[in-house]
Image (cartoon, rainbow, N blue to C red):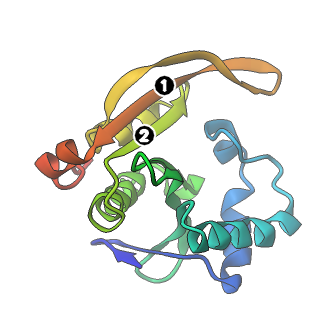
């Protein structure tokens, strides 16, 4: 479990299914993420939560729920696709639409980067987002990810090919900054 000034970030539990469904079944999240469908099938929530727990168990990734201090589910953050040979992984996150523009993603990503570099001892964390998702790119910039390039027409959504921005942060860069900037 990770704690920040405003958030608790922890592994998912069975009791989280309904709250997760209310947040993840969102057209806004669908339009700004690479792999989340809309409408989100309710029966898939439990399967997805089990998938995240299995990934943690086998050390392939750590994808956890973001909760406010009252226990309300806000979104998801994680380090996924971990390559233990080369010591790198990929940041992933989404925030429920009603919580957008409050700095929660930046705060959660900062906590997860500390976990990635301090506890998991990774050397590199990369991130990617579709170019129309400027808010996600901004989160990575605030967390000192360095822009690495553009993958043109890398993904297809609603029959349209979209470009994807790639960024990354190295362990040595992270310790210079220690945490993400506020706002």
Viewer-nearest residue: 102 or 175:
175
Q: CA distance from mark 1 to mark 2?
A: 11 Å
Check the picture and name the quadrant holding the N terminus: bottom left
When asked about the image quadrant of residue 135, the answer is: top left
Crowding around mark 1 (Cα neighbors within 10 Å: few <14, some 14 to 19, many 20+) is: many
Q: Is residue 131 left or right of residue 155?
A: left
Q: Secondary structure at mark 2?
A: strand
Mark whose residue sits in front, 1 or 2: 2
Report whether 85 appears left or right of 52. left
Percent position of residue 73, x then y: 56, 72
Numbered label tally = 2
In screen coordinates, is 20 left or right of 63? Answer: right
Q: Secondary structure at mark 1?
A: strand
Name of the residue lying farthest toward the front: 85
Image coordinates for residue 82, horizontal then vertical, percent? 50, 53
Q: Residue at x 34, y 65 (%)?
A: 115
Q: Position of residue 153 (x, y in %)?
A: 66, 15
Q: Which residue is mark 1?
A: 165
State which quadrant residue 47 falls in. bottom right
| Residue denoted by label 2 | 126
Q: Position of residue 99 (x, y in %)?
A: 50, 57
Residue 49's quadrant in the figure? bottom right
Q: Residue at x 65, y 46 (%)?
A: 29
Q: Which residue is most to the top?
A: 152
Instruction: Return the residue nearer the eye: 82 or 12.
Output: 82
Q: Residue at x 39, y 50 (%)?
A: 87
Determine which of the numbered discs, if any, sits on residue 142 in the image: none
Whichever of labels 1 and 2 marks the residue nearer the N terminus, that label is 2
């Amino acid at each position: 479990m990770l704690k920040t000034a405003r958030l608790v970030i922890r592994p998912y539990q069975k009791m989280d299914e309904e709250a997760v469904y209310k947040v993840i079944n969102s057209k806004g999240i669908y339009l700004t993420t690479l792999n989340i469908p809309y409408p989100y099938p309710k029966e898939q929530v439990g399967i997805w939560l089990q998938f995240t727990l299995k990934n943690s168990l086998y050390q392939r990734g750590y994808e956890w729920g973001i909760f406010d201090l009252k226990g309300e589910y806000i979104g998801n953050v994680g380090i996924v696709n971990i390559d233990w040979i080369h010591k790198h992984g990929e940041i992933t996150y989404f925030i429920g639409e009603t919580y957008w523009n409050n700095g929660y993603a930046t705060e959660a990503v900062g906590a997860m980067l500390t976990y990635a570099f301090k506890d998991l001892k990774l050397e590199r964390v990369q991130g990617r987002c579709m170019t129309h998702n400027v808010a996600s790119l901004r989160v990575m910039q605030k967390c000192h990810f360095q822009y690495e390039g553009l993958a043109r027409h890398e993904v297809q959504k609603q029959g349209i090919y979209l470009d994807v921005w790639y960024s990354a942060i190295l362990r040595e860069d992270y310790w210079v900054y220690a945490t993400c900037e506020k706002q």
